[in-house]
Amino acid sequence: MAEREEEENYNLEEHQLPIVYHSEYNVSAFGIEHLHPFDSSKWKRVIAHLKDMNLITDATTVEPSLPTFEELTRVHDRKYLKSVRNPLKAAQIVEIPLVGCLPPCVIESKLLHPLRLQAGGSVLAANLALKHGWAINVGGGFHHASYSDGGGFCFYADITMAICDLFDKKAITNAIVVDVDAHQGNGHARDFANNENVFVFDVFNPYVYPHDREARQFINKAVHVNSHTTDTSYISELRKQLTQCLENRQNLTPPGFDFILYNAGTDCLFGDPLGAMNLSPQCIISRDEVVFKLAREKGIPICMLTSGGYQKNNAHLIAKSIENLHSKNLINLGIN
């Protein structure tokens, strides 16, 4: 009975799409959030742009539930989970010293609650992707968080949570994390270091944060890019390397991947203050198209997370990319 109930939870109403969002995703704490380059209202602005494009309505998205403490302990150390409520630890992770002056109750309600909800959104989106072929969490992608630590605005290891949830349900056998955020995804790389059933594919700029050389040894395929990488070379190398990884897996036992976790950060866009790359908006749109097209060709369910991106135009770019995926019939938003 429990299994049947879980399965039914991932059935969509007729008006819904496998797009996960909650109005409480957004971070606001008396303006302090503006002291970090991260756009803490990016997620609601993505939704607003999608509505303006007539791609979705308020009834379209699926709301996640908040993960419980016990659910978080499946992938996190209990001491770490308790430590993030400490203002000094929270300040360290978000890289805003003034956060250390906030009371724990404010840290919980204004910062941890929204990000924990986004983590729950990633778990929900992963399950929706398995059932419907694709899903997008308009949030999440906290790829610097691991079992016992956080950093770079990442408190909860939602990538690890989502994949482990599918493993726990025996819903998948082999997963691949395709991380194209400009920064190295050191959190999930550490978490899956000894897991042969998770392949980490990471396209990142090695000259920016987090400079985690130890974690690099846990990346199965690293593709280094930088400020000199052109649109053409980026797309060419991404398509070549990812295609090769997906095809090579076909020769293993059991063959192939049965799930793609796509961490689609947009901080590799030209002008990003932290990504230090120079890709055009069209390149980012093409990048997402390449990954979704390969997923479609290989018949692999794909779950997309929005991850990093530190400019005000990132929200519009994400929406434009989703629009492009729909126009190319790589996702179906149920409109003409």
Image (cartoon, rainbow, N blue to C red):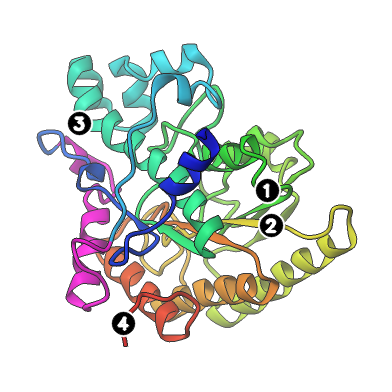
Residue denoted by label 1: 172
**Crowding near pointer 4: few (<14 within 10 Å), some, many (20+)?**
few
Q: Can residue 102 be seen in this view?
A: no
Label 1 close to label 2 by CB (< 8 Å): yes
**Crowding near pointer 2: few (<14 within 10 Å), some, many (20+)?**
some
Marks 1 and 2 sit apart, C-alpha to C-alpha, by: 6 Å
Nearer the camera: disc 3 or disc 4 = 4
Q: Residue 110 carries which label?
A: 3
Q: Is residue 208 left or right of residue 258?
A: left
Write the residue at 28% across / 17% down. Answer: 87
Nearer the observer, 281 or 160: 160
- Say if 298 sits above or below 22 in the image: below
Q: Residue 258 carries which label?
A: 2
Q: How many numbered marks, from 0 up? A: 4
Q: Where is residue 151 in the image (x, y as percent from the top left)?
A: 45, 33
Residue denoted by label 4: 335
Write the residue at 72% across / 75% down. Answer: 240
Marks 2 and 4 sit apart, C-alpha to C-alpha, by: 28 Å
The stretch of residues the image draws in magenta is 32-60
Q: In which quarter of the image is residue 251?
A: bottom right
Considering only order in the chain, which callout, 2 or 1, is on the residue closer to the N terminus? Answer: 1
**Crowding near pointer 3: few (<14 within 10 Å), some, many (20+)?**
some
Q: Which amino acid does label 4 sit on?
A: Ile
Q: Which amino acid does label 1 sit on?
A: Ile
Write the residue at 77% across / 63% down. Answer: 245
Question: Which structural element holds mark 2?
Answer: loop
Question: Which structural element holds mark 4?
Answer: loop
Q: Where is residue 194 in the image (x, y as percent from the top left)?
A: 76, 33
Label 3 close to label 1 by CB (< 8 Å): no
Q: In which quarter of the image is the C terminus?
A: bottom left
